[in-house]
Image: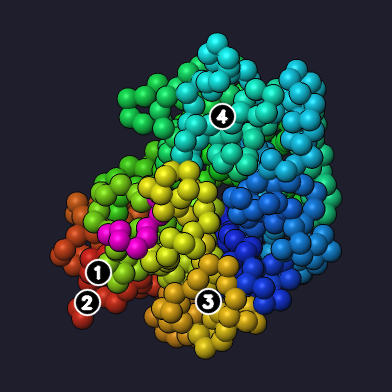
Amino acid sequence: MPSPTTDWWRSAVIYQIYPRSFADSNGDGMGDLPGITTRLSDLRDLGVDAVWLSPFYPSPQHDAGYDVADYRSVDPLFGDLGDADKMIHEARALGLKVIIDLVPNHTSHEHAWFRAALAAGSGSPERERYIFRDGRGPDGSEPPNGWQSVFGGPAWERVPDGQWYLHLFDVSQPDLNWDSPDVREEFVAVLRFWLDRGVDGFRVDVAHGLIKDADFADWHYAGEILGGLAPEGAPPPPMWDQDGVHDIYRQWRGVLDEYDGGRILVAEAWVQPADRLARYVRPDEMHQAFNFEYLDTPWSADPLRRVIDSTTAANAAVGAPTTWVLSNHDVVRHATRLGYPVGEPRRHGIGIGDPQPDVALGLRRARAATLQMLALPGSAYLYQGEELGLPEATEIADSYRQDPAWKRSGHTERGRDGCRVPIPWEADAPSYGFGPRDASWLPQPPVWAEYAVDRQRDVTGSTYEMYRAALRLRATHKLGLGTLSWVDTPADVLAFRNGALLVLTNFGDAPAELPLSARVQLTSGPLTADGRVPQDVTVWARV
């Protein structure tokens, strides 16, 4: 039986691949599975333990594949099932685990089930698989309640026969009814389909949203794109973090435990406080849950120490590791996010005409934040391109935007396209090495050339080489399985020990002192001439 010291996922570094933006094998401007397969050796050389792929299922692509039309196949945009099998086989040969996205809160409106539900009519078994309700008002012309979509606008859409269906996201993403036995049986079958093909786990999209309040209590507050469950002062939302979700994950955990190799479930759950999130990673439920509270914490010593303490303690209480993350496909990249004044609210996209970040400051802080994160006990997730110091593409013309949040918010939220632009591999190649031609589904900024892998590989001090060194030292010192102990420091300095390693981040104006015995192993930026730590720099040192 695996133990807390042998479970691979407790300390793993997992690299998120956004398939349409990672590597394009055929020059159509869209990343694909064969392209990913050719680049897996680069990820092995980087030093990660596993990859997580965002959806590659058949989809009309109204929400970049998170509107799934068929959970047992591959969209022709990305290849076919044979390509998926080859990718899984190649990853395994390279010693990499493979985690894939599972989207259980909703399907595409083009899924066979939803088409059948529309055809079958009110009260039918087909409609019971989704959340259909009669409208309010004398003629049923008002939505069943005041719930809002997190992409903007009402969360209900009326169909020709007069009923309404719930879509907490885009209108093309009808929510499933998890009180339906058909839904529960179907997703167990989907789990088995991919487990039998060799995947090592599932990142569960909107893991906190599957069960809705049975009374469908009215709630008029606007949804926020990946920013918590409710505005300050609002009552608990009736559509998020309902207790019934845990029964689903207990069933799924039982399925995964039938397979060898340590198959895992990872929760995307925007849930606070920390002890509430920890319920998703109890011993008979999921294995990991992203620590979004850490991602959202201001770049300041005291708030970071508090969130590290609270989330670590909450997870330890249920015997789970903490899962650290700074960037993903849904948030502004941290190399850009940290280029704004400390304490400003997190932006949900940046575009032309918006306040622009301090690019140099953002990268400096991002490098420091990364070394801090990778030294913390637990598991860590990296988002493709962050190892290059890649910033958000903040000046995409609005005419190119594809995120449904842009349209549904009435063009008030720029959305997530800026963090999804295809990444650069070769500075002087077409599409910066993303594919064999200049085609790219989102425009790549000219500045991408300076961030390309081939401009940074084997270059001392580059962000890419900093990541490689950090991952190598993290493995050598077994930091993911270590124990954190705080070190007393001035107010603007955060320092802790993890085993033999001292990790110190300086947030203040004045350079910070290292112990006389410190032997520096890695820094996020240059030290002063006399060996002190400047502002916005993290140091790893043996003491």
Mark 1, mark 3: which one is toward the viewer? Answer: 3
- Pointer 3 residue: 424
Look at the numbered disc 3 and give the secondary structure of its residue.
Answer: loop
Figure quadrant of residue 50: bottom right
Mark 1, mark 4: which one is toward the viewer? Answer: 4
- Pointer 4 residue: 156
In x, y percent, where is residue 180?
74, 24
Q: Mark 1 or mark 3, which has the lower sequence index?
A: 3
In x, y percent, where is residue 316?
50, 38
- Badge 2: residue crowd in 10 Å (few <14, some 14–19, many ≥20): few
Residue at 53 percent across and 67 percent down: it is 442
Mark 3, mark 4: which one is toward the viewer? Answer: 4
Look at the picture and state if 112 lies above or below 80: above
In x, y percent, where is residue 370?
41, 62
Residue type at tag 2: Thr
Q: Gap in Å between the C-alphas at discs 1 and 3?
A: 31 Å
Tell which of 172 and 498 is nearer to you: 172
Residue at 26 percent across and 49 percent down: it is 344
Main SS category, magenta section: loop
- Left or right of 86 on screen, residue 49: left
| The label number, if any, that marks residue 533 in the structure image | 1
Q: Mark 4 or mark 2, which has the lower sequence index?
A: 4
Look at the numbered disc 1 and give the secondary structure of its residue.
Answer: loop
